[in-house]
Amino acid sequence: MNKSQTSHVFSVDLEDWYQGIEIDIDQWDAFVPRIRNGLDPLLDLLQESNTKATFFVLGYQAEKTPELIRQLSDSGHDIASHGYSHRFVYQQTPDEFRTELRKSKVILEDICGQPIDGYRAPFFSITNASLWALDILLEEGFKYDSSLFPVKNYRYGVKGAQRKPGWITTQDGNRLFEIPLSTVRLPNPAMRMARNIPMSGGGYFRLYPYALTKLLVRCLEKERLGLVFYMHPWEYDPDHPKVEFPRAFPKFTHYLNLHTSAEKTRRLLSDFQFKTIKNCYAEHYLSASK
Ligand SMILES: [Zn+2]
């Protein structure tokens, strides 16, 4: 096997299937939990390739299955926060966001016995409407964020956001280490401009043929950029229930090509070398900001 030498990040947004589909937390008790149905095949794939991942864990799920999160942490995976309720950040007030963030941090630190210093927003929902959240992350002791997606769609994205991991300046003038989701810059001569093609994982990974993903990762490597890859446990559980969504398009992307996730992931892990965010970037985000 001839893997490239570039270090890529494997991340997992750890939530159960009904938590990431725009159904409010008040209704979650009605759904049957299946976290292990998807997580176990994913963990098998990671183990087969001797890969450790960063798990952005939803606080609500951590409360339900603390032993599972402890097991992940004890086996060398990296634990970070995915908030508590999976509500869009831009639909929360700054106070609500802070309360939820604090709650998730306490839950995860109690379980893992170590500081939780990374965050990823539900639905990548730190956008121009919620950039204030980045200052609150710093105030609450977080060292890095991995929520910004340099694209623009109906649900998330910050057009013009930097594509490379590095320090960003927040609204209040503070410095925060940002690990944006991966995009490939594609020239568009017809419009005399370039645009960012999302290719970071999740629905994009399930939509694209594996050969296209591989090509796009090679494009990143030519720029000396590592892929910041993300998946969810439910993407490895193609038999999870089909329910009605509040909106049609998210339903389409949620269930798209679920049966392809495992095999594509096996190939990705075979072709490229992945690490946790901590292993790739801690020396940067733990250094004093400049
Ligand atoms: Zn999520």
Image (spheres, grey):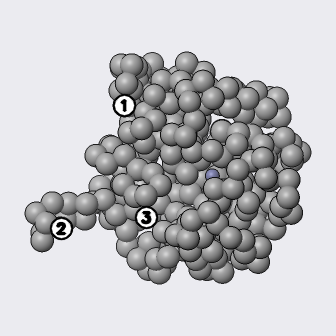
Circle 1: is it few (<14), some (14-19), or many (20+) Cα within 10 Å? some
Task: Name the foreground residue: 211 vs 3.
Answer: 211
Task: Name the foreground residue: 155 vs 207.
Answer: 155
Q: Earlier in the sequence, mark 1 or mark 3?
A: 1
Q: Between tags 2 and 3, which lies in front? A: 2
Measured in 3D between alpha carbons, the distance from the residue under mark 2 to the one under mark 3, in whole angstroms, is 17 Å
Q: Which residue is mark 2?
A: 188
**Residue at image coords 50%, 30%:** 133
**Residue at image coords 37%, 31%:** 168
Q: Quadrant of residue 132?
A: top left
Measured in 3D between alpha carbons, the distance from the residue under mark 2 to the one under mark 1, in whole angstroms, is 27 Å
Percent position (x, y) of residue 287? 47, 23
Measured in 3D between alpha carbons, the distance from the residue under mark 1 to the one under mark 3, in whole angstroms, is 22 Å
**Residue at image coords 31%, 48%:** 159
In the rendered image, which quarter contains the N terminus? bottom right
Q: Quadrant of residue 278?
A: top right
Q: Earlier in the sequence, mark 2 or mark 3?
A: 2
Left or right of 57 on screen, residue 147: left
Q: Which residue is mark 3?
A: 199
Percent position (x, y) of residue 186? 25, 65
Q: Which residue is mark 1?
A: 168
Amino acid on which disc 1 is placed: Ile
Percent position (x, y) of residue 43? 75, 62
Position of 170 relative to 215 (above/below): above
Q: Secondary structure at mark 2?
A: strand
**Residue at image coords 36%, 50%:** 150
Circle 2: is it few (<14), some (14-19), or many (20+) Cα within 10 Å? few
In the rendered image, which quarter contains the C terminus? top left
Q: Secondary structure at mark 3?
A: loop
Amino acid on which disc 3 is placed: Met
Amino acid on which disc 2 is placed: Asn
CB at disc 2 and ligand 1 closer than 8 Å: no
